[in-house]
Amino acid sequence: RRSSDLAIEEPVKKETSKRGIVNSSCPLNLRSEPKKDAKIVTIMPGESRLSIEGEDGDFYKVKFNSLEGYAMKKFIDVK
């Protein structure tokens, strides 16, 4: 076989999201960008459970209910 005949397979991506919980009884802002002054997408109640999809500086990229955005790391405990 010629190398041009071989199909190139994409590696299988593993689920990399982690679970997190808002580490306060106070609400936490879910923001549109990883900035303290970015638009607030929603306010997550204290002790809310969420999925952590990635990191960007002092923020986690998270999924809360059906919404995605950024929340400050220091207010989230990773489980």
Image (cartoon, rainbow, N blue to C red):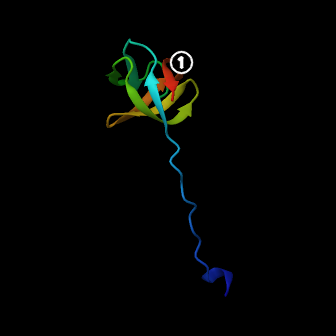
Residue at image location 38% in from the left, 11% down from the top: 26
Viewer-side residue, 57 vs 22: 22
- Say which quarter of the image contains residue 66: top left
Which quadrant would the N terminus be assigned to in this image?
bottom right
Q: Can residue 32 be seen in this snapshot?
A: no
In percent of width and height, residue 22 lies at 43, 21
Residue ranking furthest to the front: 79
**Residue type pointed to by label 1:** Lys
Most foreground residue, 33 or 29:
29
Q: Quadrant of residue 42?
A: top left
Q: Position of residue 29 (x, y in %)?
A: 39, 20
Q: Nearer the viewer, residue 59 or 37?
A: 59
Query: Compared to 4, does 17 lie above or below?
Result: above
Under circle 1, the secondary element is helix
Rendered view: 46 above or below 70:
above
Q: Mark 1 Cα within 10 Å, few/some/many (few <14, many 20+)?
A: few
Q: Is residue 58 left or right of residue 31?
A: right
| Residue 54 against residue 59 in the figure, above or below | below
Query: Where is residue 13 shown, x and y percent of the image?
Result: 54, 54
Residue tagged 1: 74
Say which residue appears at 44% left-offset and 25% top-offset. Answer: 21
Label count reads 1
What residue is rendered at 67% in x and 85% in y? Answer: 2
Q: Is residue 42 visible?
A: yes
